[in-house]
Image (tube, coloured by chain):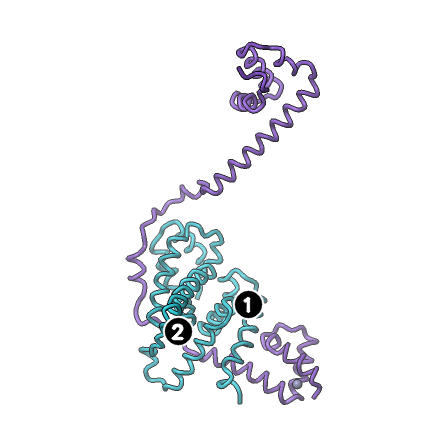
Amino acid sequence: MNAKRCDETRELLADFDAGLLDERRADEVTAHAAECEACGAELAALKRTAALLDATEPARPSRDLWPGVAQKLAPRQPSRTWWGIPRPAQMRLALQVATIVLLILALTVILPLHWDQGPAVSLPHAVDDDAALFGHWYAQASLTSGLGNVQALSLIAATQPPEAAP
Amino acid sequence: MKPPDSTAVVGRAKAGDVQAFEALFRDHHARVYNLAYSILADRTEAEDVTQRAFVKAWEELPRLREVAAFAGWLNRIAANLARDVARSRAARKVPANHSEPTGDKADQGLLAEERDAQVHRAIGSLPEHQREVVIMYHLQGVPVQEVAEQLGIAQGTVLSRLARGREALRRKLAPYVEQ
Ligand SMILES: [Zn+2]
């Protein structure tokens, strides 16, 4: 027998036996196994392996194992309300995403303000009174961007220039 | 083997329903036990691992996302516990207590018992993915399609793992399958 042909067939026997080969290769294996005694014997051994496994008794526990399990189960409230609550890892991720979004918001809203309104934005530098400065920033942030109070305040906190510090 | 609404049962157990969890135990414990037994070759240890695997599964269930792949997930838990036991036993240099099969097997010949024990040990030496499909398909008679569903993998993957597993077992069990 052609040794190369035998090697190729041996490689395919398990897949052939499992029905995984396409028709052409399956036909080749069938033909070779029929005329080659060694490969035919190998295929038969594979089939006997499957039969041996099928005939093997599964192991069985000597007793009912459930009572031993049941007594160790910590009670859990049958409840669905906690399903929607994010776990700590997700909470952290949400906070990180929120921070990034806030930064992007600050950059995309504030930078255009500087470019579009030119001198109006340089106003804070001319104002030395803290209260006036705050009022100006608050008004500008909420009026020009349509932000709510909280967002406008965060924006002010995030963008207050160093000159504004007392 | 697998009740049609098993995903719903897993969902109920996940929400804390002990009765649903007992139903899961009844459906899955034989496989888990065989998995542990193939790794440990010791009935008492396999029983202990089976119980601990279900207790752990109960604790971890709320974090299980792929409810449909419950069986494979449970297999992982059991296999990990069994490997831990095998490792600590090896560290203590204690040999496996190859306990005799009991009950309905008493009237079978010693040869058949020894052969079955060899088969279980050979299955235990397979890579994990091959071992679980061989146990499910050959020892428990679960059809390929159901094995695929329970493990959340394609039928072709099941067949391929079975092919590789049988190929390896044919060599490990040579005295029984060569003529
Ligand atoms: Zn040949």
| Left or right: A18, with B50 as reference point | right
The residue pinned by badge 2 equals: B41
Tell me the subunit letter for badge 1.
B
Tell me the subunit letter for badge 2.
B
Ligand 1 is found in the corner quadrant, namely: bottom right
Which is more toward the observer, A134 or B79? A134
The disc, 2 or 1, on the residue closer to the chain's N-terminal end is 2
Judging by colour alone, the chain drawn in purple in this rendered image is A
Q: Is mark 1 within 8 Å of ligand 1?
A: no
| Left or right: A100, with B59 as reference point | right
Judging by colour alone, the chain drawn in cyan in this rendered image is B
Task: Give, as a three-letter code, the residue at label 2.
Answer: Ala
Q: Position of residue B43 (x, y in %)?
A: 35, 72
| Residue drawn where x is 67% and y is 73% of the image | A22
Which is more toward the observer, A94 or A61? A94
Label 1 neighbourhood size at 10 Å, few (<14), some (14-19), many (20+)?
A: many
Which is more toward the observer, A159 or B92? B92
SS assignment at label 2? loop
The CA span between labels 2 and 1 is: 25 Å
Task: Give, as a three-letter code, the residue at label 1.
Answer: Val
| Residue drawn where x is 59% and y is 67% of the image | B156
Q: Is mark 2 within 8 Å of ligand 1?
A: no
Residue A65's label in the rendered image is none
Q: Position of residue B104 (x, y in %)?
A: 33, 79
| Residue drawn where x is 53% and y is 80% of the image | B170
SS assignment at label 1? helix
A98 over A125 or under it: above or below: below
The residue pinned by badge 1 equals: B158
Q: Position of residue B47 (x, y in %)?
A: 34, 67
